[in-house]
Image (spheres, coloured by chain):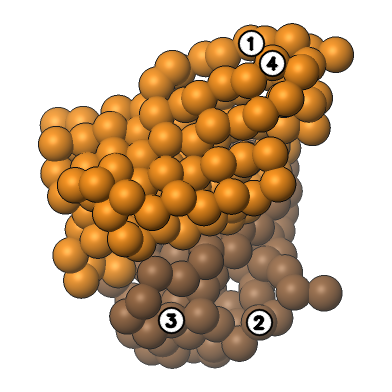
Chain colours: A orange, B brown
Amino acid sequence: TQLLEQSPQFLSIQEGENLTVYCNSSSVFSSLQWYRQEPGEGPVLLVTVVTGGEVKKLKRLTFQFGDARKDSSLHITAAQPGDTGLYLCAPKKGNNRKLIWGLGTSLAVNP
Amino acid sequence: EAQVTQNPRYLITVTGKKLTVTCSQNMNHEYMSWYRQDPGLGLRQIYYSMNVEVTDKGDVPEGYKVSRKEKRNFPLILESPSPNQTSLYFCASSLGGSQPGELFFGEGSRLTVL
């Protein structure tokens, strides 16, 4: 059973466009992390959100944790080719240290 | 420079020939983990270790072994590799403790078993 759904699966946009990707579940999470994985490399942490309704900004990236802590979104403003990569959400349930990994959104930003 | 180092980065081998993928971290992290990444299946945890001499099975441990004799090293052993173990493997580490911590990943080891 897939506990986590990331959408869209693939996204190809032009430089300068805005976009939002989603991470949804029917489960309640204690925290959620977003990672970006560039081709040929391992994932790199972008942000951790813990509180329902929390919004965090990282330059042109805005992350939001849903009020009920069941979902999250990542909004990128004025996308650049350097934003190209696989965006993975990884929530945790309860006190379990284990991360649950989504399949990711593969983003391509064309110059 | 803080990093997780995996070797080899690329390996082509044949069924049944034992191999070891090494993983070393220089951040004094307590927690280390191995994942495999496959198209359509995402990242799946193979084994993890909370500290030296403490290892536990992840979601897909069959066909793999690990050891944690030193804090910095966490090798992944395939005693008798099979074609279904062809995959991209990642080692990761984090500081430890109960709070959500940042996972630091290696660059990956792409394994092909013929």
Q: Is residue B34 visible?
A: no
Disc 1 packing (10 Å; few <14; some 14–19; many ≥20): few
Q: For the residues carrying marks 4 and 3, which lies nearer the camera in this image?
A: 4
Q: Are marks 3 and 1 on the same chain?
A: no
For residue A12, which numbered disc appears in the image?
A: 1
Q: Nearer the viewer, mark 1 or mark 4?
A: 4
Would you call the spot at circle 2 few (<14 residues within 10 Å), some (14-19), or many (20 or more)? some
Q: Nearer the viewer, mark 3 or mark 1?
A: 1
Q: Position of residue B109 (x, y in %)?
A: 64, 47
> What's the amino acid at mark 1?
Ser
Which residue is labeled 3 in the image?
B96
Same chain shared by disc 2 and disc 4 = no
The residue lying at 70 percent from left, 58 percent from top is: B7
Quadrant in which residue B40 is drawn: top left
Whether callout 2 and callout 1 share a subunit is answered no
What separation in Å lies between label 2 and label 4 (alpha carbons)? Answer: 38 Å
Q: Is A105 or B31 nearer to us in this picture?
A: A105
Mark 3 and mark 1: Cα distance apart in space = 37 Å
Disc number lying in front (2 or 1): 1
Q: Amino acid at mark 3?
A: Gly
Task: Nearest to the eye among marks 2 and 4: give it.
Answer: 4
Q: Nearer the viewer, residue B54 or A2?
A: A2
**Rendered view: A41 above or below A17:** below
Instruction: Give the residue at mark 4.
Output: A17
Q: CA distance from mark 1 to mark 4?
A: 10 Å
Say which element carries label 2.
Answer: loop
Secondary structure category for the residue under label 4: loop
Provide the secondary structure element on which disc 3 rests.
loop
